[in-house]
Image: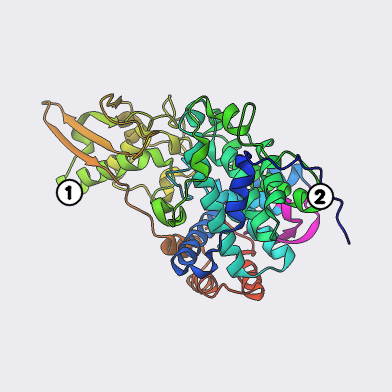
Amino acid sequence: MSHPQPYLQPPATSSLTLAWAEQLAGLDPIGEPAVLEAARTGLTDYLACALGGANDPGIDALLQAWSAAPGTATVIGRDLATEPTLAALLNGYSGHALDYDDVHRSVRGHPSTVLLPALLALAQSRGLAGRQLLAAYAVGVEAMGRLGLAIGGAHYEAGFHNTATLGTVAAAAACAWLLGLPAQSLAVAIGLAATQAAGLRVQFGSAAKPLHAGLAARNGLSSALLAEAGLGGAIDSLEGKGGFLDVYGYGQAVPQRLLARDDTWQILQPGLIFKRYASCAATHHAADAVLALRQQQGADASATQRIVVTFPPGLTTPLARELPRDRQAGRFSVEYVVAHALWHGHLNASAFEAGEIDAGVADLMARVVVKVDAQAASITQPPFARFSVVELFDAKGLRSSARADAPQAGDPLEKLRAAAATAEHGDRLLGGIALLDDASSLQRLLDAVAPLVTNR
């Protein structure tokens, strides 16, 4: 069946979007073993997070709002298959529900929980090979990282959620690449995604935050499918007056960074950061520092009268301004994270489960003071350095302190084993990821993550 010819603006040599689309269309990660291995690790971490979030009540609300017609795309942990765009929405939500999914410094957001739900749904529904999925994922991380570098720090500081805004565009690019669309159609897909890109940080701490990831995955996939079907749109949507970078960049965008690519892949450098704790990444440096004080210096929560946490400019932006009312809201509170870690000596899954905050933790988090070191470099500018300093003071004013410059990474393999129903199930999932290559191996892997997740 022939597709209608899309309306395209006349090719312009000055179209940065088209030039970027040509660059992305020409990428070939298949022959890059390190890139594909990094993609496997990212897939491992994403599946762990999606299985962990699959029984979130938000999924039930989404299924009530969007009737799930039978289809070919697996909904992770729900014993359900539906049409691809709805599967992308649901799997994007579950992957971000715990805020345990990976982050990327160029993006200042979460790439995998947007890219992989869209790509998994597309690859499964079209019978595409697992290695092509991994390659498209690497292209998506490349696109999202480059777009993050190009748009600058003002976009996030103004209140946008980069996971949602940049993720929609990157998911469209990755899906268009997986479909093998020519550069002009890929540019159209980028433009269709850019005109749908949305998500505000005011939603942090609510169910709308993981919904951002789901909507970005769905809209990115839809944009690629619309471009494939022949729906037209601008091929210069990112640059110029009124373009995505102009409107969303707040004067700080550097459009040429889209094309400033060397031989380094964003999935390798700076690479994906896998979380150790199921909380906002901005809390992780402080968490590591206070756990070090407790474990290495014997810091005593009961003797602590005051806690001072110091950040570089920009790192406090995503954090809650008020003390949390429950443990789940504590994901976005450095006061809660530091207090819980000092009081209990850990930040495992129970720290962020539904329920009331312990009296001891509540008392301690009220003693936390958050400061910003105005002399330090902002995290919004290269080299995007992050740190936290935690100082503990006792009743006599004696001080102990620790500084963390790089958060301790989580282990995706251990996270997936913990999320699996049984040890045998975990081994099956890890084996499926290791052997992921053709279409049948992808289907087997998705069959393994399909069974209903129950509270464990």
The residue depicted at 52 percent of the width and 25 percent of the height is: 250
Task: Kindly report the distance in space between the C-alpha atoms of the residues bearing marks 1 and 2.
Answer: 61 Å
Q: How is the image coloured?
A: rainbow
| x and y, in percent, of residue 260 in the image | 47, 46
Q: Quadrant of residue 123?
A: bottom right
Q: Mark 2 or mark 1, which is nearer the start of the sequence?
A: 2
Residue furthest right as drawn: 1
Q: Is residue 112 visible?
A: no
Quadrant in the picture for the N terminus? bottom right
The three-letter code of the residue at mark 2 reads: Gly
Question: Residue 64: percent from the left, percent from the top?
Answer: 75, 44
Whole-percent x and y of residue 362?
Answer: 36, 31
Residue 267 seen: yes
Residue 239 locus on image (x, y percent):
60, 34
Question: Is residue 339 or residue 245 the one in the foreground?
Answer: 245
Q: Which residue is mark 2?
A: 230
Q: Is residue 10 above or below residue 81?
A: above
* Residue bounds of the magenta highlight: 67-86
For the residue labelled by badge 2, is the local secondary structure a helix, a strand or a loop?
loop
In this picture, residue 24 sits left or right of residue 260: right
62 drawn magenta: no
Left of 426 or right of it: where is 361? left
Circles 1 and 2 in contact, beta carbons < 8 Å:
no
Which label sits on residue 296? 1
Q: State whether residue 323 is above or below residue 3.
A: above
Residue 11, image quadrant: top right
Say how many tags the image has: 2
The amino acid beneath tag 1 is: Gln
Residue drawn at point x = 43 percent, y = 64 percent: 413
Query: Which of label 1 and label 2 is nearer to you?
Result: 2
Residue in front for this viewpoint, 406 or 47 = 406
Instruction: Please identify the residue farthest to the front as the structure is shown.
Output: 13
